[in-house]
Amino acid sequence: MYEFDRDRYVTPAGSGSFQGNVSPLWNVGPVPNGGYVLSLAMAALEQTFAGLDPLTVTAHFLRPTAPGPIEAAVETIKRGRNFSTAMVALRQDGKESVRVLATYGRLDAVEAEREFVDGTPPAVARDDCLLWNRPKGMAPEIANRFESRIASEDAKRMQTGDADRAEVRGWIRFVDGRPADVHCLGLIADAFPPPVFMVTERGWVPTIELTVHVRARPTSDWLNCIFRTRFLFGGLLEEDGEIWDASGRLVALSRQLAGRPRTT
């Protein structure tokens, strides 16, 4: 079993409840990455809506989640012919830490029709990117779960922290060879180094809300990504993302609202 599948596995416990365990292997400092925590809710939804694909998933982070046991309580709101919707409450020690609202369906349900795509994948060749490595002990634990390659000019701007824009482009895949699929896209949407690091100090960037729109099933292990932040003020920032597969197909869009980086 691949690391991601092992660490997001949840067991049915009856009445729409699932039991799982939050692994510390996906931590940023002492706190599990928000996209990884979302993946636990998505694992419960995957079993609830067997055979369906996530189309839109939104997570509101109420309090930090900690490594250890977790409960995912699923409330099915609607089972429809085309779309099915549910809420998931993730709880630890009797307290809710994350509330998720999601709609599932079939990505291949719509027959071929005219397409309009006003966008292209980031024009960054993987061989021209820099392997995103940091000295042992300085990288967050989650960084060890991926092979990340960042556009060389973006990596250089991130090192200085005084760029004129906050944008990071590059490629990412699981280091253990796990294929990309629709169930990992919530994690990938939160797995790159935050682009805000280009314009401000580094630190923990606490996610308040994360939304992922899944548009297609990935057909490659490597995913080509771009993440941007345009507005940082009042202690908050937004981060918009595009995730493309190696065939040039858009597989997901993301947006999150987060707090500015914290050093403590």
Image (cartoon, rainbow, N blue to C red):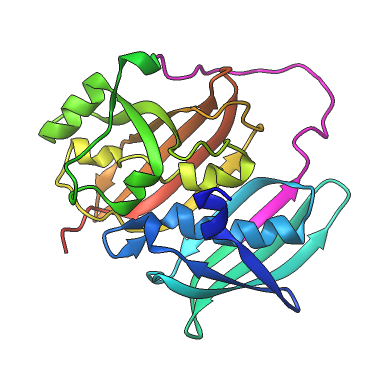
Predominant secondary structure in magenta? loop
On the question of residue 209 being in view, the answer is: no
On the question of residue 227 being in view, the answer is: yes
Is residue 127 magenta-colored? no
Hey, which residue is sitting farthest right in the picture?
Answer: 81
| Residue for point 47% across, 55% down | 36
Q: Is residue 183 left or right of residue 86?
A: left
Q: Say if 48 sits above or below 92 in the image.
A: above
Q: Is residue 187 left or right of residue 218?
A: left
| Residue for point 65% across, 65% down | 87
Percent position of residue 165, x then y:
23, 29
Percent position of residue 18, x then y:
65, 72
Residue situated in front as seen by the camera: 145 or 185: 145
Is residue 110 magenta-colored? yes
* Quadrant of image for the C terminus: bottom left
Residue situated in front as seen by the camera: 1 or 228: 1
Q: Say if 186 sits above or below 123 in the image.
A: below
Q: Which residues are magenta?
A: 101-124
Percent position of residue 208, x then y:
40, 59
Q: Say if 24 sits above or below 96 in the image.
A: above
